[in-house]
Image (cartoon, helix red, strand yellow):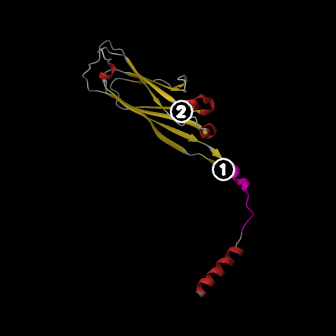
Amino acid sequence: MKSINRISIILCLFILTSCYESLDFRQLDDVVFKPVFTSSLIHFTVVPSQFFDSAGIQQNSISDITDIDGLQSWFNEEFLVKIDVNAEVINELDRGVTFTVELLNSDSDVVYTFTPIVIEAEDLNYSYLEEVEIASNRGVLNSTKVRITAALENTGTPLDINDTRMFVFESSVTFYIESSF
């Protein structure tokens, strides 16, 4: 018991007599936090049979709209500075494919269109990156949907509806945030 009292007294003396300087909270004005977050965006696989309608007629393009959440928050309006959209594509088909990616608002109006993604026939290792600076593209923050359209190169020969070759589209988005005190 005596040793605990001695330790307590020594600890109190140490705390009361230790050196200190006055704190300068203005140093925090220069601190900027820059976290980076990456998330999966869209992933799909398409085979030639998906380019045929119910009557068996080949369509040269297909399109899909997917809901996206979270870009409209006050946090993003205040702190989001840049978005990187990455895509990896495997195209096993014997013709090129062009992807058009558009961000849409809640009224389905286009608020941003990415540079078309053009993949040559049988390109098994295609990479794409587009950087979107929020300061010059504020409309991106109103996005609630993404529309992706895949258009086939017209080679003059029809697709084989039973062909098992495919193309695979995988994408992610990286958010760059800046915040200071």
The quarter of the displayed image where residue 163 is located: top left
Q: Mark number for residue 131?
A: 2
Magenta span contains residue 21: yes
Q: Nearer the viewer, residue 154 or 43?
A: 43
Residue 45 image offset from top left, x and y in percent: 35, 30
Mark pair 2, 1: CA separation:
25 Å
Please, which residue is most extreme toward the left here? Answer: 162
Q: Is residue 173 left or right of residue 137?
A: left
Residue placed at 69% from the left, 52% from the top? 28
Residue placed at 64% from the left, 39% from the top? 78
Residue 39 appears in the picture as rendered: yes
- Looking at the rendered structure, the secondary structure element under dot 1 is loop
Residue placed at 56% from the left, 40% from the top? 176
Magenta span contains residue 88: no
Q: Mark number for residue 96?
A: none
Decide: is 48 above or below 127: above
Q: Nearer the viewer, residue 36 or 125?
A: 36
Residue 148 image offset from top left, x and y in percent: 44, 25
Q: Which residues are magenta?
A: 20-29
Residue 57 image offset from top left, x and y in percent: 31, 14
Kindly identify the amino acid type of the residue bearing the numbered disc 2.
Glu
- Looking at the rendered structure, the secondary structure element under dot 2 is strand
Kindly identify the amino acid type of the residue bearing the numbered disc 1.
Val
The crowding category of the residue bearing disc 2, from other C-alpha atoms within 10 Å (few below 14, some 14 to 19, many at least 20), is: few
Residue position marked by numbered label 1 in the rendering: 31
Decide: is 155 above or below 145: above
The quarter of the displayed image where residue 4 is located: bottom right
The quarter of the displayed image where residue 91 is located: top left
